[in-house]
Amino acid sequence: MGSFKLGGMTLGSLFKKPETLLYPLETKPAPAGLKGHIVNDASLCILCGICAKACPADAIVVEKKERTWAIDPFRCVQCSSCVRACPKACLHMLPTYTPIATAQSCTVVEVPDPKA
């Protein structure tokens, strides 16, 4: 009885579309609700540091003197609490897959001085 079931599945799969993807050629669409990664719009950022205080993983570092905003993607847990806490709405969660990292590094954004 089991061999008839297996034969039926095999014959049925000969005429169906394949379930797998050819990864480098075809990419899987992003699922609904994927949070992705944090992106900072430097032109709107005022370096207030509220996002760094709201981050539960301490992944964000704001240096006011050097005018830099940095995030460690390996520490970020994609909770988006920094996005909700930002008063200028300069932080966004992009729902895309990030490329595979070969080394641990921080993403540093230099914020331009609005007075200059």
Image: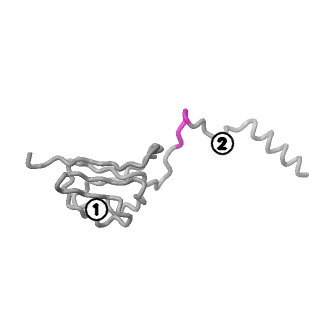
Q: In which quarter of the image is residue 89?
A: bottom left
| Image side of residue 18 versus residue 108, left or right | right
The percent position of residue 81, horizontal first and vertical second, equals 35, 64
Question: In this orientation, which residue lies closer to the viewer: 60 or 17?
Answer: 60
Q: What residue sits 22% from the left and 57% below the top? A: 88
Q: What residue sits 48% from the left and 53% below the top? A: 32
Colouring of the image: one colour
Mark 1 or mark 2: which comes first in sequence?
A: 2
Residue extending furthest left? 115
Asked if the residue at tag 2 contacts the one at tag 1, i.e. Cβ–Cβ closer than 8 Å, the answer is: no
Question: Local crowd at mark 2 within 10 Å, few (<14), some, or many (≥20)?
Answer: few
Residue extending furthest top? 25
Residue extending furthest front? 103
Indicate the amino acid at tag 2: Glu
Q: In which quarter of the image is residue 86?
A: bottom left
Indicate the amino acid at tag 1: Cys
Q: Which mark is residue 19?
A: 2
The percent position of residue 19, horizontal first and vertical second, equals 66, 42
Q: Give the range drawn in magenta.
A: 24-28
Quadrant for the C terminus, please.
top left
Q: What residue sits 23% from the left and 48% below the top? A: 42
Q: Residue 51 carries which label?
A: 1
Magenta residues, dominant SS class: loop
Report if residue 25 lies within the magenta region.
yes
Report if residue 106 lies within the magenta region.
no
| Image side of residue 56 versus residue 23, left or right | left
Q: Distance between the residues labelled 1 and 2?
A: 42 Å
Residue extending furthest right? 1
